Image (cartoon, helix red, strand yellow):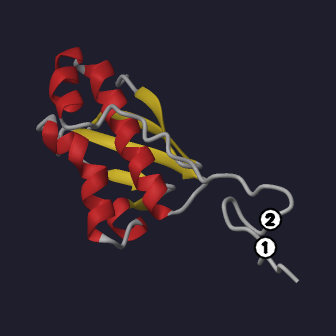
Amino acid sequence: MSTTTYSATGRRKTAIAQVRMTAGTGKILVNGRPYEEYFTVAAQQSAVLKPLEVAKTVNAYDVAVNARGGGTAGQAGAISLGIARVLIQVTPELRASLKAEGLLTRDSRMRERKKPGQPGARKRFQFSKR
């Protein structure tokens, strides 16, 4: 029995999530662990589920995710984008509804780099007039 596997990549901040999706019963594994165990914050769990809820396919697919880099919040956002991109591959008609929810937009906000001659990105060393 050969089932089709769809895959896509999602990114947010420094987090990267490689998402593989097959037809199944709705199991979501993140780095080999159930997503409820991996993400302890309810907002992050709902962020992971949101694309599937919008597409009304919560129990239709098994999702396996390899997430690396960043923290749990960034990884949750990256997984959400990855799942949304995979759903478009499966059924292109979902694009409009996913786009309306803002699930196809890559959040490009990154940490600003530290500049030389100062302690942080914007902070300056204390100025002494005398």
- Residue 25 visible from this viewpoint: no
Residue at image mark 2: 118
CB contact under 8 Å: marks 2 and 1 = yes
Kindly indicate the quadrant of the structure image that contains residue 84: top left
Mark 1 residue element? loop
Mark 2 residue element? loop
The residue lying at 24 percent from left, 58 percent from top is 46
Q: Position of residue 99 (x, y in %)?
A: 23, 28
In the image, residue 52 sits, relative to residue 33, either above or below, namely: above
Left or right of 52? Residue 4 is right
Extreme residue toward the bottom, this view: 130
Residue at image mark 1: 125
Say few, some or many: other residues with alpha carbon within 10 Å of mark 1 (under 14 / 14 to 19 / 20 or more): few
Residue type pointed to by label 2: Gln
Extreme residue toward the front, this view: 130
Residue 38 — which label? none
Q: Position of residue 93 (x, y in %)?
A: 17, 16
Q: Report the Cα–Cα distance between label 2 and label 1.
A: 6 Å
Q: Position of residue 56 (x, y in %)?
A: 11, 38
The residue lying at 29 percent from left, 53 percent from top is 47
First in sequence: mark 2 vs mark 1: 2
